Image (tube, rainbow, N blue to C red):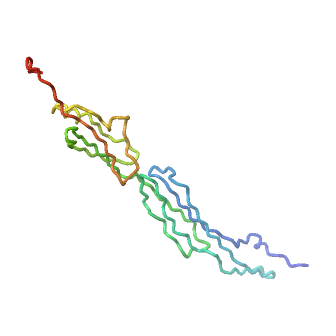
Amino acid sequence: DSPRWPGTVENLDNKESVSRTIHYVYEDGSKAKDDVVETLNFKRWSNVNLVTGHIDFQDWTTNDDTFDKVVSPTIAGYTADKSEIPAVSGVKAKDQDRVETVTYRKDAQKAVIRYVSTNGNRVLTTDEVTGKSGEAIAYSTTSQITEFKKQGYKLVSDEFTAGGAKVYDYDTARDQVYTVTLSERVEPVNPDNPTP
């Protein structure tokens, strides 16, 4: 007859795994990119004394004890609070699983509204407004146009108002530029009735 294996062997666990999960989220907590999960696997041998039931555990071994460096993905119009998750070496079989979170915040954007005259293409004035990617540009050309009309100009075109409400784009390399074109009013004066 063969000797009986001690009952403790039934629950013997000679394999372990340790994982690192990287979450990519926006400021509101919603998902920005798929998680990146890396798992390291460990194993060990055990020697069981069939007389005493004693179990002699060997050291844990693995082919890889390092979580790799992971560069945070790029999302247009957003900046990650961590450019990368660094490598972690020397991970042990009984270490806790790791969880890292990378948060993406909207980039600051700028819009420029230029008021120009058709007479010599002179820039009459320029307004600059700032906000965040994807947000509505809180600006109206009405007051400036009204003021220029009082000075004797008339409106030719208004790129900012044309096409409806404007939003900040996701390009941090270039400012958004809108041009409002005005021309100097020239009115004929009737010699018989010189007052307009």
Quadrant containing the C terminus is top left
Quadrant housing residue 124: top left
The vertical placement of 27 against 42, above or below, is above
Q: Nearer the viewer, residue 106 or 20?
A: 106
Percent across and percent down for residue 68 are 54, 69
Please give the name of the residue rendered at 55% of the width and 76% of the height, measured from the top-left corner. 90
> Would you identify the image quadrant in which residue 19 lies?
bottom right
Residue at screen point 91% across, 78% down: 1
Query: Which residue is nearer to you in this view: 3 or 99?
Result: 99
Eyeballing the image, is 31 above or below 185? Answer: below
- For this view, does 131 lie left or right of residue 147? right
Residue in the picture at 29% in, 34% down = 157
Above or below: residue 18 compared with residue 118: below
Image position, residue 166 (x, y; %): 37, 40
Q: Residue at x 62, y 73 (%)?
A: 93
In the visual, does 8 lie left or right of 173?
right
Q: Position of residue 179 (x, y in %)?
A: 29, 41
Q: Is residue 20 left or right of residue 74?
A: right
Image label count: 0
Q: Residue furthest right?
A: 1
Q: Quadrant of residue 193?
A: top left
Closer-to-camera residue (22/69): 69
Furthest toward the top, the residue is: 192
